[in-house]
């Protein structure tokens, strides 16, 4: 078996509540993603998806277990992955181009050099002509493109995207999904994508981790055996429909358990 690009093994996360009792946010979670794959995490709000990303990004030290990237322990290490936060904002006082080069600048590349590097990507990925605009002049979809491009240009092989399309209308969202698949294929990165939209997860992913809450844990790991490229019509196909239904059934049955408990 090849070494996974990224691996979480036996990760548990406990938080102390204000009343002093312990809250189990994640329980013994194991996730493995091979190089170049697109994996999604789906699960109800509060099941710990963002916490998993914070742990992978080294921003949160897990109570137990660890993170391995490229076969090496990366637990608690910052800077090893590109991370687009759930509410990743562009700085309103920076132009689109200067927002996009932020990740590179953080890595120590000069502003001038970073701009020269980033500009062709802006043109290639649908932001040409907007490089000197300020974020307030952009549509929601364009702002997300800029934020995603910033994350992808940050020089790292693993990219974490936390519900990047959650706030977009359905049409913009589906255009953004196609755009993301294109850019993912061009860059050859390993992506972990968080969404609570089952259809989005199936359409985008090679594999899906389904989670349940209280405590946050993986309840299923499903491959998506649909070839690429994926025209929209595949969403009407039998494999797609069946997978979507499997995911929804899993989510519903565990949700009911949690409510009954
Ligand atoms: N730093 C923290 N301190 C205490 N509780 C937290 C902290 N971070 C997250 N939580 C709790 O852990 C649970 C999982 O949160 P989160 O990872 O944001 O879930 P999701 O992204 O799946 O909606 C939530 O109940 C949240 O309130
Ligand atoms: Mg979240």
Image (cartoon, rainbow, N blue to C red):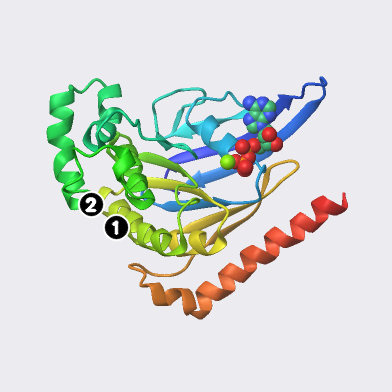
Q: Measuring 71% from the left and 28% from the top, which residue is drawn there?
A: 14
Q: Measuring 36% from the left and 69% from the top, which residue is drawn there?
A: 230
Tell whether label 1 touches label 2 (CB within 8 Å). yes
Front residue of 251/163: it is 163
Circle 1 residue: 182
Residue 168 shows which numbered tag?
A: none
Front residue of 50/208: it is 50
Q: Earlier in the sequence, mark 2 or mark 1?
A: 2
The secondary structure type at the circle numbered 2 is loop
Q: Is residue 43 left or right of residue 152?
A: right
Residue 218, horizontal then vertical, whole percent: 65, 48
Residue 205, horizontal then vertical, whole percent: 45, 58
Q: Measuring 80% from the left and 50% from the top, which residue is drawn there?
A: 258
The image quadrant where one finds ligand 1 is top right
| Mark 2 residue's CB less than 8 Å from ligand 2 | no
Visible in this render: residue 70?
Answer: no
How packed mark 2 is, by other alpha carbons closer than 10 Å (few <14, some 14-19, many 20 or more), is: some
Front residue of 248/11: it is 248
Residue that extends furthest to the front in the rendered view of this protein: 137
Residue 139, horizontal then vertical, whole percent: 34, 50
| Mark 1 residue's CB less than 8 Å from ligand 2 | no
Q: Measuring 29% from the left and 52% from the top, which residue is drawn there?
A: 183
Residue that extends furthest to the right in the rendered view of this protein: 261
The secondary structure type at the circle numbered 1 is helix
How packed mark 1 is, by other alpha carbons closer than 10 Å (few <14, some 14-19, many 20 or more), is: few
Residue 21, horizontal then vertical, whole percent: 82, 24
Circle 2 residue: 125
From what the image shows, is residue 61 above or below residue 27?
Answer: above
Visible in this render: residue 72?
Answer: yes
Q: CA gap, disc 2 to disc 1? A: 9 Å
Q: Is residue 133 left or right of residue 54?
A: left
From what the image shows, is residue 180 above or below residue 199?
Answer: above
């Amino acid at each position: 078996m090849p070494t996974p690009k990224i691996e979480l093994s036996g990760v548990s996360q406990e938080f102390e509540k204000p009343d002093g009792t312990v809250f189990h946010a994640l329980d013994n979670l194991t996730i493995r993603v091979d190089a170049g794959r697109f994996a999604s995490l789906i699960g109800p709000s509060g099941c710990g998806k963002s916490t998993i990303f914070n742990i992978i990004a080294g921003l949160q030290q897990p109570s137990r277990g660890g993170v391995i990237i490229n076969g090496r322990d990366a637990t608690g290490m910052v800077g090893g992955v590109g991370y687009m936060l759930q509410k990743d904002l562009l700085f309103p006082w920076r132009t689109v181009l200067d927002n996009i080069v932020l990740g590179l600048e953080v890595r120590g590349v000069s502003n001038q050099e970073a701009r020269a590097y980033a500009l062709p990507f802006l043109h290639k990925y649908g932001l040409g002509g907007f490089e000197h605009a300020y974020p307030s002049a952009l549509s929601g979809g364009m702002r997300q493109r800029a934020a995603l491009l910033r994350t992808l240009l940050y020089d790292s092989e693993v990219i974490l995207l936390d519900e990047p399309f959650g706030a977009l209308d359905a049409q913009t969202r589906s255009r953004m999904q196609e755009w993301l698949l294109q850019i993912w294929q061009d860059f050859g990165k390993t992506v972990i994508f968080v969404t609570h939209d089952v259809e989005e997860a199936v359409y985008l992913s090679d594999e899906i981790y389904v989670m349940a809450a209280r405590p946050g844990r993986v309840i299923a790991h499903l491959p998506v055996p649909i070839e690429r490229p994926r025209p929209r019509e595949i969403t009407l196909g039998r494999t797609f429909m069946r997978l979507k239904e499997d995911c929804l059934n899993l989510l519903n049955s565990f949700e009911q358990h949690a409510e009954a408990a």
